[in-house]
Amino acid sequence: MTGYIVKRLLQLIPVLIGVSIVVFLMIYLIPGDAAEVIAGPTATAEEITNIRIKLGLDQPAYVQYFRYMSGVVRGDLGYSFQTGQAVSEAIATRYVNTFGLALFSALIAVIIGVTAGIISAVKQNSWFDHICMSISILGISAPTFWIGLLLIIIFCVELKILPISGLSGQLWTWDGMKHMILPAITLGFNSSAMIARMTRSSVLEIIHQDYIMTARAKGLSEFIVIMKHAFKNALIPIITVIGIDFGSLLGGAVVVESVFAINGIGRLMVQSINARDFPMVQGTVLVVATTFVLINLMVDIIYAAIDPRISYK
Amino acid sequence: MDTLLKVNSLKTYFYTIDGVMPAVDDVSFEVMRGETLGIVGESGSGKSVTALSIMRLVPHPPGRIVGGSINFKGDELLTKKEYEMRMIRGNKIAMIFQDPMTSLNPLFTIGDQIIEALVTHQDLSRREARDRAIEMLKLVGIPSPEKRVDDYPHQMSGGMRQRVMIAMGLSCRPDLLIADEPTTALDVTIQAQILELISEMKQKMNMSVIIITHDLGVVAEVADRVVVMYAGRVMEYGSVKDVFSMPLHPYTRGLMDSIPKIDVNEDRLKSIEGTLPTLTEKFKGCRFKDRCVMADRVCHEEEPPIVEIDNRQVRCFKYI
């Protein structure tokens, strides 16, 4: 197991280097360069050249890359062209909000999705199963902005029990939590639908395995048969879906963050792309991509913890 | 010898979209204490469903036990509540399955899986149960059981896993072991070892065994009496000695003839032509009639009853 984790960690290094190279090269694909953006539309060619030299943009790409990376490993992601704020600082405050949102919605999604999925599988073709699966189709196909707006109309406009939008202050306060409820439900509803369907089909597949009959023939109660013997085996695909969902939630739920006006990393990314704020774009993409890679690593480690055959050679 | 298990007119039907399938239809037999009963028949003859009916583990839906009685040690199993059945399963009646590669849960150590059976039925601490599990592994011939107890199923071979299944089944010292094709998925040499182990365990633990197989060789080797099943019906029932020396039913005879003989040079293996009938409500006559070389007009019109001849039973008009 330890060997497996070490191996997976080592495999992480080339992936992260690859990510950084892609992120770095990304800005070369965009027409115009940073110096032109900073200098503004009225600048002379000479001014632009000066800025270029100041920023080191006249250097060869590999020099620029190493300069950038030596900053990154020290936690320095550069400074925003727009505000002059340190990129790492700007990301850090946004990241807390996005992480909180992702965590809440994942929690909601897992609790609802897994429970509904297991019950649907055990009571296959019952009314509960049919209702659950119909709602989950809705959850998968309804766009999040629509669900979000619907929830705002119900809970904020009509019932007036939750704030409409705009998480401005601290997340980990009562007020912050209240702001988080609706966006978390909006996102959680969508992924709980995916998780419910995956759980159902995975459990259904497992309960027809021979070892489930063995467990029953041992005289175990149906609860233990399902929760211990079937569910643990059904977990691998469920964990995969949860991991992917959680990863993409952390990658910034751009739409939901916009609907609920949450200062999250997704919104920051969109804003900086629109403003051609290159260091900010690089920084956010790098952080999001790294998060995604790390979540995948965690998923892989959880796989191995669940299934002894994975780390076995 | 007293009777341990008495199955009487057992009917287990499957309710499918295509209609009602009588998987087990009016099946009766007895298992004496210390006896081994063989149930033979081809795939789909209802032998496994019979076993699952005794355990009350027929998948429902679509299956349901619709009639008959199963008497175990004087108790009727078919009227027992689910929690009462759970106290019997794995404790008084144990079952092992065909494919040892898929019958053990891949995510738990074999020790865990044996201990689970023990702590469910017996008043043992985990430590005591673990010691008992090691003892059982040793008994079924697993080398260095103290170490193997912490192995996962994938670290063992098929034969080893079937030994583990047997250890698990026998851990609570059941009165009856039902072995559903225990050797079918194994190599021939391992098959013999496993059969020998089952016989040995039967002696040591003074239990009864029902061995389900499509292999007459297995029956000849280990069973005292044999039930020959076809399309949900008992076709012949008697002591192994009688049935093997003089098979009465044309089906049993066909099965015997299908065994390749080592002293006769044959170009083609003999077989019983045809396949199992699809049983619908309209089905008339003997279930074996379409494949029977001796079928008469009466066989197509009516179904023969069971007839008793010298301590054995046969379902055929030839003996009426």
Image: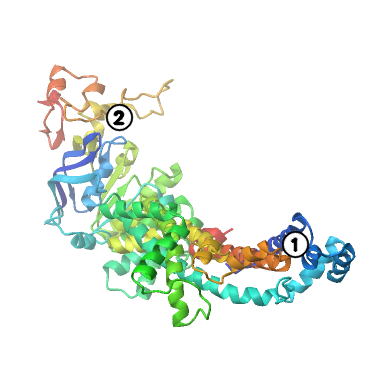
Its colouring scheme is: rainbow
Outermost residue to the right = A46
Task: Give the quarter of the image for residue B25.
Answer: top left
Which residue is disc 1 drawn over? A24
| Secondary structure found at label 2 | helix
Which residue is situated farthest in the top direction here?
A: B297
User: Which kind of residue does numbered mark 2 sit on?
Assistant: Met
Residue B201 visible in image: no
User: Both on one chain, marks 2 and 1?
Assistant: no
Circle 2 chain: B
**Residue in front for this viewpoint, A23 or B31:** A23
Which amino acid, mark 1?
A: Phe
Q: Residue A312 carries which label?
A: none
Given residues A145 and B209, the one toward you in this image is A145
A181 or B263, which lies in front? A181
**Relative side of B308 to A17, left or right:** left
The residue where tag 2 is placed is B256
Left or right of A135? Residue A106 is right
Q: Do residues under tags 2 and 1 come within 8 Å of each other at their CB atoms?
A: no
Q: What element carries label 1?
A: helix
Q: Residues within 10 Å of mark 1 (few under 14, many from 20)?
A: many
Q: Give x and y (percent) for residue A99.
A: 54, 71
Q: Residue furthest bottom?
A: A173
User: Which residue is at a point 15% across and 25% down the rendered structure image?
Assistant: B284
Residue at x 26%, y 36% (from the top left corner): B45
* Subunit ID for the residue under disc 1: A
x and y percent of residue A298 in the render? Answer: 56, 66
